[in-house]
Image: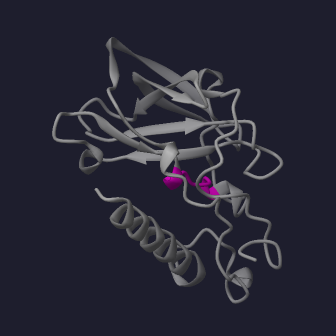
Amino acid sequence: MTDDAWLDALRTHREQKDRYLAGDRNSPIPPDQREVFDGLDYFDPDPDLRFELELREYDDPERITIGTSTDGERAYLAWGRFEFEVDGESYALDAYRADADEDRLWVPFRDETNAEETYGAGRYLDLEAADRTDDGRWVVDFNYTYNPFCAYSPRYECPLVPMENWLEVRIEAGEKDYEGPGGGGE
């Protein structure tokens, strides 16, 4: 994908997300806030935070229980690990599946932007089958990271980020924290 095509696709994705949040009846933004919602705040696009990575799949994926924002629990399979570099330092993130038969991955993470610029509990990245290269690597593009729905309203239950995915680096990509009316999208 060319840089221009990548940037156009990212901008289109962000515009569609903002339209969904502003006007869809299933939006997690509370209805009384949608009228004044003028879009999310995002970090500037950064092509250096887009990687094509091999997933180092675990031989025997472990079923783990992840706590949620409402003191609930959800079960996931720890499916594999992505390894990558940011500013010359090596990092790794586990990728999860809800079911062994699905061809999608969920990559939650926390980083050093949490609680100041991004949602305090962390952000998510979803990878679908279409996010694979011809040679089978996964496109892990942090510019597409998003806030869980509980960042917009406490009525949602969101899985918490496992400690294995707490990064000691700033990932300045994707969605910033939603501050509600008058705070987001300005």
For the C terminus, the image quarter is bottom right
| Foreground pick, 16 / 143 | 143
**Would residue 137 appear left or right of 91 to someone viewing this image?**
left
**Would residue 36 appear left or right of 3 to someone viewing this image?**
right
Residue, x 67% and y 55% (percent of image)?
A: 150
State the image coordinates of residue 65 (x, y, percent, origin top left): 54, 24
**In the rendered image of this protein, does residue 66 appear above or below residue 14?**
above
State the image coordinates of residue 157 (x, y, percent, origin top left): 63, 49
State the image coordinates of residue 82 (x, y, percent, origin top left): 43, 26
Residue lying farthest top?
59
Q: Quadrant of residue 95?
A: top left
Residue, x 43% and y 31% (percent of image)?
A: 96
Residue, x 27% and y 33% (percent of image)?
A: 137
Whether residue 86 appears in magenta in the rendering, the answer is no
| Foreground pick, 63 / 40 | 40
Q: Quadrant of residue 99?
A: top left
Residue, x 65% and y 38% (percent of image)?
A: 68
State the image coordinates of residue 59 (x, y, percent, origin top left): 30, 10
**In the rendered image of this protein, does residue 23 appear above or below residue 110?**
below
Picture colour scheme: one colour
Please state the extent of the stretch shown in magenta in the rendering. 143-149
For the N terminus, the image quarter is bottom left
